Image (cartoon, coloured by chain):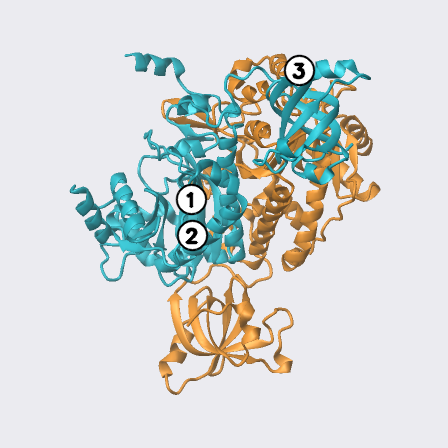
Chain colours: A cyan, B orange
């Protein structure tokens, strides 16, 4: 008999169905056994009443434990009015079990998956990731994350962007610097891409508008709540722009669509975290870097580096935008040319600054973007001005020799975005299998780390 | 004035519009200059007639060369009946230019982008990839490829699969063997994932049905028409299956949807290659490995390895299926356990064989899949039977300790699939930026390679 999904049980009252899923919990009440059965669509109560024709049936049901996998045939009944569970969509029905097949057993759980929260430290949570991901609040995170990716995919497809596959093995460190992982590539050395930057720009010369979703790598030796060594970047790049403000406009449109879709499709997931969705203004406020710096300094009272924003300043500016500008999103534009990559378009009014931006949301930078230099000679000059030999980028530069329109783009960190939408304290909670200095799935040098901690 | 896309010009007859794009070609007829302007949506003829008010205008138009990027304001006119170009959707209109802004220039092209084919060897084609990708036949490949990815995304989303982000930095070589790239990971060694296998299986324990699209890595030192060292894998994995035939069913449904969508949305792209779309039977023929081996041997007359199919045998079987079974797709099932990874479910009837399959299409394997072992003890035994210490896979095995349903899945090679749909001779043609032993964008050791070839 074909499987019925739990979400469809209320449509099958009085009918015999086959359900399959995991045992959430078992409760014995005298001779009657109750279990909550869970599948990908919902939870339903299953009743095992004594069965005279088959006395083994009850004994088998007694062996069920949390996370056992079972297939159960039975009839869907309405529950008495005073027994309806209003909290779940299938709360007004139950399954009266007639046949039970145990598809797989489970060892006894070291944690309570039915607790409202998993009360454990992040490292322990990650040590047991294949188990802790089953908790409803962990599942909520990754359902919301899948929704973010889906809206990105849909929105940019609808707006004429072509999806592309960008390579991750690259011959040079894209953004410069030492924070890049190296690979033994046959007889050569290669690197893991820090972004799809060069390839998405090349593809603007081909398709005008492109987007790409994929992993990027940063070998930063930082263990913070904001950093990951491997993360998913949502990237787009578009030709025929006036300047960076065209990019800010399309980002605003996507964010509106995203919030709309999250509200429609992830209601329960957002509810579990109790964090309200942000309001997206028609014009997300934008302040220039020098202005932002002034505001941050005034609030913090601290003199900081003139070329970039400190993490604390990003938090301050986010708070300022929420309070004074009525927006949880804030564009900071015109970053200093010294701190931006050599492909960034300088500002006409003052070439010490650039036509670039960061997007801040709830205290962190969730996107970086800007207009790029599209003129071949200007680009070669810009590379040289950083003391780099342009021959290193011969392949990339070819795209600019044969007609590149004025263009730009941006990249979003998927995990940061997810974490901020749900109010998670650490970006690693919004990463299925986070990689950091100490961990790839499990700790890399457990003995060594324990020893160091003891010192 | 807002930009009008070329595809929308026939709706704007008599109106003044702004177009922007690339110069495909310029033709001078006496005092009148014609160019074909191309944007992401189409091509239109632009007419520059002498302009008395602005004599410079004509001189500027004369400087236009192929791949120059231009913005042109003018009026959309209907072309005389005898001048209509039936081959393109905008062939019945033209733009009478009034204003011209050159947004970027281009160097003179070393190839003719307007030729029907680019008549050059694959290595030269790849050396100039940022330029050669602009050819309409190259663009056709990657438009079709984006469509394949899109249908995969849509089909599996619609069928209750959750999209996940699988990590690519892994602590062990997934499929075993030495053909894996290693990374310097801080003070450790790590590897590039050969597939998202472990992670998609873990996630079946969480979400029941998942899919993931991403790069995978094979350090195979082969330079063939079928191999890539970095490719895109379309992966799905699902719980609560009866056996591998459930997977074959859902693959068949996806392929039907894919062919339908390609037919609807990539008509011109397929036409350019003149390769008809395959017909997907309601039941794609499936033959067991021993049977397939018998057929291949009978046709080839060659005795080959008993444990796997040779590339030549895959070609023979594909031809056989097309001719005798009326299907360009063929499932070969029940591969020998010795040649399949340790997580593969053995066949009940004869455990020397497995509940696995390859999918052949037009001569090559485009997908591999099967049911996996879901019982923890059986899985540990299977690892041990290969002489491997199960402690290596402690993290992965955790998913099987806490209730894994009967499950399985498959992975498709995106580039192979694309190449076979369009009839391309080499999978590298269906890869935007292919990585092979000798090449990452450009050749890695040009001098060395030239020297070796001279020897």
Taking A74 as reference, is B266 above or below it?
Answer: below
Cβ–Cβ below 8 Å for labels 3 and 1? Answer: no
**Residue B364 visible (yes or no):** no
* Front-most of residues A90 and B245: A90
- The answer to whether the residues at label 1 and label 2 have Cβ atoms under 8 Å apart is no
What residue do we see at 77% from left, 14% from top?
A55
Q: What is the distance, in whole Å, between disc 1 and disc 2 at their CAs? A: 36 Å
Q: Residue at x 82, y 31 (%)?
A: B298
Which of the 4 image quarters holds residue A447? top left
Alpha-carbon span between mark 3 and mark 1: 44 Å
Residue occupied by mark 3: A30
For mark 1, what is the residue?
A276
> Callout 1: helix, strand or loop?
loop
Q: Is residue B221 visible?
A: yes
Pick whichever of labels 2 and 3 is earlier in the sequence.
3
Q: Is residue B288 above or below residue B54?
A: above
Judge depth for marks 3 and 1 and give the one in front.
3
- Say which quadrant the C terminus of chain A sits in: top left
> Residue A215: which disc?
none
What percent of the width, then of the height, locates residue B237?
62, 33
Q: Would residue A84 appear left or right of B354 to someone viewing this image?
A: left
Q: Are marks 2 and 3 on the same chain?
A: yes
Quadrant of the drawing holding the N terminus of chain A: top right
**Dot 1: chain letter:** A
Q: Position of residue A19 (x, y in %)?
A: 70, 30
Give the answer, above or below, for where B176 lies relative to B275.
Answer: above
Q: Residue furthest front?
A: A82
């Amino acid at each position: 008999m074909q499987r019925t999904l739990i979400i469809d049980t209320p449509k099958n009252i009085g009918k015999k169905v086959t359900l399959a899923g995991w045992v959430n919990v078992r409760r014995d009440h005298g001779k009657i056994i109750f279990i909550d059965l869970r599948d990908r669509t919902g939870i339903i109560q299953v009743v095992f009443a004594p069965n005279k024709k088959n006395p083994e049936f009850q004994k088998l049901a007694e062996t069920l434990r949390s996370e056992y996998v079972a297939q159960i045939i039975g009839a869907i009944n309405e529950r008495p009015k005073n027994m309806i569970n209003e909290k779940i969509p299938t709360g007004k029905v139950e399954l009266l079990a007639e046949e039970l097949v145990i598809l797989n057993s489970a060892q006894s759980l070291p944690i309570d998956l039915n607790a409202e929260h998993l009360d454990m430290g992040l490292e322990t949570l990650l040590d047991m990731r294949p188990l802790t991901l089953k908790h409803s609040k962990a599942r909520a995170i990754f359902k919301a994350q899948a929704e973010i990716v889906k809206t990105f995919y849909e929105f940019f497809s609808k707006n004429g962007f072509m999806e592309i596959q960008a390579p991750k093995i690259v011959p040079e460190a894209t953004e410069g610097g030492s924070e890049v992982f190296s690979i033994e590539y046959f007889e050569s050395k290669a690197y893991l891409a820090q972004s799809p930057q060069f390839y998405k720009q090349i593809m603007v010369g081909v398709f005008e508008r492109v987007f790409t979703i994929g992993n990027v790598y940063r070998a930063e030796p930082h263990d913070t709540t904001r950093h990951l060594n491997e993360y998913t970047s949502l990237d787009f790049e578009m030709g025929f722009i006036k300047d960076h403000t065209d990019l800010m406009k399309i980002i605003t449109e996507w964010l509106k669509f995203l919030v709309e879709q999250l509200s429609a499709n992830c209601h329960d997931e957002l509810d579990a975290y109790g964090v309200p969705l942000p309001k997206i203004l028609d014009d997300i406020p934008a302040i220039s870097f020098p202005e932002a710096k002034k505001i941050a300094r005034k609030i913090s009272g601290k003199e900081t580096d003139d070329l970039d924003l400190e993490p604390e300043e990003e938090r301050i500016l986010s708070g300022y935008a929420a309070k004074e500008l009525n927006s949880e999103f804030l564009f900071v534009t015109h970053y200093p040319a010294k701190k931006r990559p050599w492909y960034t378009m300088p500002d006409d009014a003052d070439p010490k600054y650039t036509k670039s931006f960061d997007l801040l949301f709830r205290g962190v930078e969730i996107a970086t973007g800007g207009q790029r230099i599209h003129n071949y000679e200007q680009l070669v000059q810009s590379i040289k001005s950083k003391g780099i030999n342009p021959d290193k980028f011969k392949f990339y530069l070819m795209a600019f020799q044969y007609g590149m329109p004025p263009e730009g783009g941006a990249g979003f960190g998927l995990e940061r975005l997810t974490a901020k939408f749900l109010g998670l304290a650490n970006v690693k909670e919004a990463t299925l299998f986070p990689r950091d200095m100490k961990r790839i799935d499990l700790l890399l040098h457990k003995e060594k780390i324990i020893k160091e901690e003891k010192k």
